[in-house]
Amino acid sequence: MRKVILSTVLIAVSTFATEVINGAGATFPYPLYSKWAYMYQKETGVRLNYQSIGSGGGVRQIKNRTVDFGASDAPLKPEETKKEKLAQFPTVVGGVVLSYNLPVKNLKLGTQAICGIFLGRVKHWDDEVIKKDNPGVKLPHRKITVIRRSDGSGTTWIFTNYLSKACPDWKKKVGYGKAVNWPTGIGAKGNEGVANYLRRVRGGIGYVEFAYALENRLKVATIQNRDGNFVKPSINTFQAAAASAKWDPKRDFYEVLTWQKGEEAYPIAGATFILLARDYPKGRNRKVVSFFDWAYRKGDRVAEELHYVPLPEKVKNRIREYWKSNGWY
């Protein structure tokens, strides 16, 4: 299986293609957007140039009007999209996972252990708070090395939003955002950067989007959810986390899926979003909308193969109505 190591995708099947769509932002959906881009160009001749620079960069670029679309895993609140004259809609749902580099299979991490590790209080893998969730497992007395994002990141936003809900001390001392003042750890750029570090650093633990963990053959922890159950990341547990989402077009589809109730709900789930400039010419936004409409119609199978959750058809139709109301569909 190929390793996800590129930070920019420029799909070029035909040298005669004249149309190019330029986007930038979240690394979370990069494996999927690169595959969709290849398929779309093959079918239509239109190229997608997507720069995987992190959600913070994607939001900045669309605010500065330097790309056709921005991409962010941290949804902008309706008051911000209104202020910046932006439209916003989701593409797929996925999950942020805790990957680790230890000679241990099927590691379980309870909420207390996760909070302690990322606050820098739990320093070794054989700490009692980890051992109590892993009876019978031989945990090494090895130093824990936290690996986290160094760039402005929607994956960080999702993960720290989860920590702020699950851990009162984290909320009080650190909070959440695309970038935070980390109490501990080594910084790496992009999901791909964190994944590459995790492959090399023994005793390392970090948060990455699920597809990156799978592509890089990283071990993934089973973690405790809001109901107290230990759940594995999967399409089913991501769907369970998104079950109560309202997807309101009047709020530009703003929705946060972390720490949801439900026996099977994965606690660090999130959607990834596209941002369009409302003051662009309608034809420019139609190009972007045409690509994502194609992805909604023909890209679900690929999304599932890469372990993302496609949106329900009724939500896709709601988004199409949203596009239509803006004259882009």
Image (cartoon, helix red, strand yellow):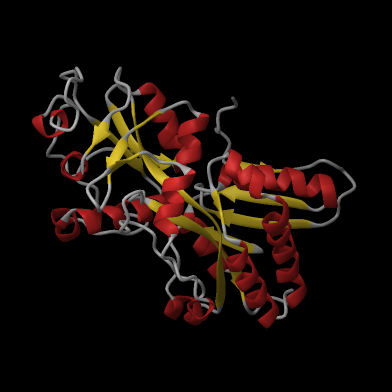
Image position of 312 with respect to 123: above or below = below
Image location of residue 174, percent across then percent down: 20, 56
Instruction: Residue at 21%, 29% (x, y): give it.
Output: 144
Foreground residue, 226 or 205? 226
The image quadrant that residue 316 belongs to is bottom right
Total numbered badges shown on the rendered structure = 0
Foreground residue, 235 or 212? 235
Image location of residue 239, percent across then percent down: 46, 53
Q: Quadrant of the N terminus?
A: top right
Instruction: Residue at 19%, 21% (x, y): give it.
Output: 142
Image location of residue 137, percent across then percent down: 20, 20
Residue 152 in sight: no
Instruction: Residue at 49%, 47% (x, y): give it.
Output: 28
Residue found farthest to the left: 128
Instruction: Residue at 37%, 57% (x, y): give it.
Output: 178
Image location of residue 56, percent across then percent down: 45, 58
Residue found farthest to the right: 16
- Left or right of 209? Residue 326 is right
The image quadrant that residue 80 belongs to is bottom left
Q: Quadrant of the C terminus?
A: bottom right
Image position of 147 with respect to 91: above or below = above
- Left or right of 1? Residue 184 is left
Image position of 122 with respect to 279: above or below = above
Residue 111 in sight: yes
